[in-house]
Structures are given as structure tokens and as C-alpha cells.
Image (tube, helix red, strand yellow):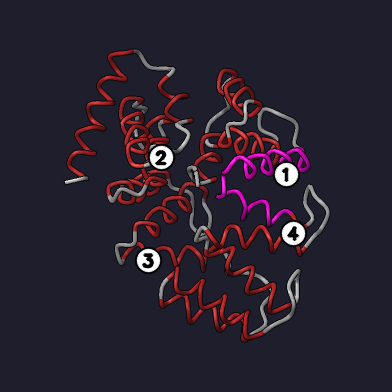
Amino acid sequence: MRRAISLFTVWFVLFSNPLQADDLTDILVAAENNNPMAQVALGAMHEHGMGVARNDTRCAYWWQRALDNGYMDISKALGSMYFSGRGVPLDYKKAMELYKIAAEHGHPHAIKYIALGYKRGLGLPQDDAKAAEWAQRAAALEGADSAVVMLESYQKKETEPHTDKELFDEFLRQAEKGNPRGNYYVSVAYTAGVGIPQDYIEAEKWARRAAETGLTSGAAHLGLFHQLGQGVPVNRVEAQKWYYIVEGLRPDDEPFLSKVNGSRMNEKERAEARSLADAWLANYQM
């Protein structure tokens, strides 16, 4: 099943720089033509009022279309809209259905919400044993340190997942152990200033660590830093190199970022980026 680049990379494209008219047109046309990544982007634009009117209902509409088109990463965010009744009717049952889709794709935060659903009887039958089972599943994905925090939070009957700072600390612990996704999420946190002061230089550093391991979400995120000049000088060739690497590692994914960036490069620049990407992939696959 197709699985696209993470939702946050789309947010980064939209909100870290002013949205250009050409970019907006690309996104609108692609979304109408059922490009799931563009649909996620358009939903995020409506969520934040960037280039279009702020409208949570339209946000949910486009995210649902993206999910219907195979963008499973959006299921957690869409579930959270139903969980809070934002842009859609409050519906814990629907939220849990979406969280379970996200859980099937290894999203630890969705798994936490399922545990919470069982613990509190929110959209699921109240069941302490199943709550503990799902909490353990989340802990297994995030590491042993997280297991203690997770189980203690349910023992204390806390109704909310971890704070941003607690999540950042968990991701940093995993990153320091060499976990590629930990590196990526530390980069995400520094980019958005979630749980830590915003710092594009640090964000680029951690994205590079993730990308060098072959993590495609890290590679796409790193490409964006070079495309937009955040933490590093603008370098479309370097950005395109990482987008081509993503394509090489995930050939079934929609190359939306590559198309947008590549359309603003000449043939010589694209050829250089392709050569750099091919060399990286050849070394990675050895």
C-alpha cells in the first residue's frame, strides 16, 4: 500500500516561508487531480489559513480524500479532528477507527490514543487490560524508557498524552541511541519549536543524521531545508538530490516535492542532482 512522506514535511513547505502563487496553483491542481500529498497540503493550508481561507471543515474534507487515495499517514491527524470535534462532529468511535488505521502503520501516538480509548471508554469498550496492552505496544515502538512513562501515566489516570517537552525528551533519547526515526522527530521538533526553542540549524543537522541512514522522511525533510534555505543556504541541486534519493528508496511514492522543486531547475541542474543521488544510492545499497 502506498505510503507518502510524513505530514510534517508538508507543513514545513507551507509555513516556514511565504507561499508563492505558483506553488499554490501546483497544490490546488494536484489536489483536484487526486494527488494525495497535495490533498494533505491543501488540508493543512485550510487548517492554518495559508493562501486559502481558514476552514477546519475543508481541512477534514481534503484529509479524508487523501486517506481515500492511500495516504495512510494522515489517519492519525484526521482521527484527532474527530476526537476533538474540530471541523467534523465529535465522534470518538470514528476517531478510534482512524487511530487503528494509523496504528497498523506503526504510529506510536495513535496507539497511545487507542490505549486511552480503552482506558476511558472513549469510542471503545472500557477495558483496562486492553488499555495496558496497547500502552505496551506504544512503548515497544518508542523504547524501554517510554514504557515506564507510558504505564505511569495510565496508573495516574492522566487523560492527555505526553507534553511536547516530554515527547521531545523521548525522541532525543532514542536519537542519541542511534534510532533513525528518533533523529527525524528531533529534527521535526527543532523545526517547529515543539518542546524545544525553534532552531533550523539544529533541525537540519538531525534531519541529515536521519537521511544518511536511508530514512526517506528524513531525506525529504533534509531536501526541504536546502530548497527553502532554512539552516543552510538555498541549494536546489542538493534538495533535488535528496528528493531523487527518496524516489530511489520509495519508487511507489508520489514524487510531489521532486516535481515542484525540479520544475524550477534547468536540465543541467537536474542532471547534476540525479548524478549525486545515483552515487549516494549506489553506496547505500552496497
Residue 85 appears left or right of 136:
right
Which residue matches tag 4?
Answer: 94
Which residue matches tag 3?
Answer: 174
Q: Is 257 covered by the magenta stretch?
A: no
CB under 8 Å between discs 2 and 4: no
What amino acid is labelled 2 in the image?
A: Ala
Residue range highlighted in magenta = 55-81
Which residue matches tag 2?
Answer: 220
Q: Specify few, some or many for label 2: CA neighbours under 10 Å numbering under 14, 14-19, or 20 or more.
A: many
Q: Earlier in the sequence, mark 2 or mark 4?
A: 4
Cα separation, mark 3 vs mark 4, equals 32 Å
Rendered location of residue 72, percent (x, y): 57, 49
Q: Which mark is residue 60?
A: 1
Residue depicted at x 34% and y 30%: 233
CB under 8 Å between discs 1 and 4: no
CB under 8 Å between discs 2 and 1: no
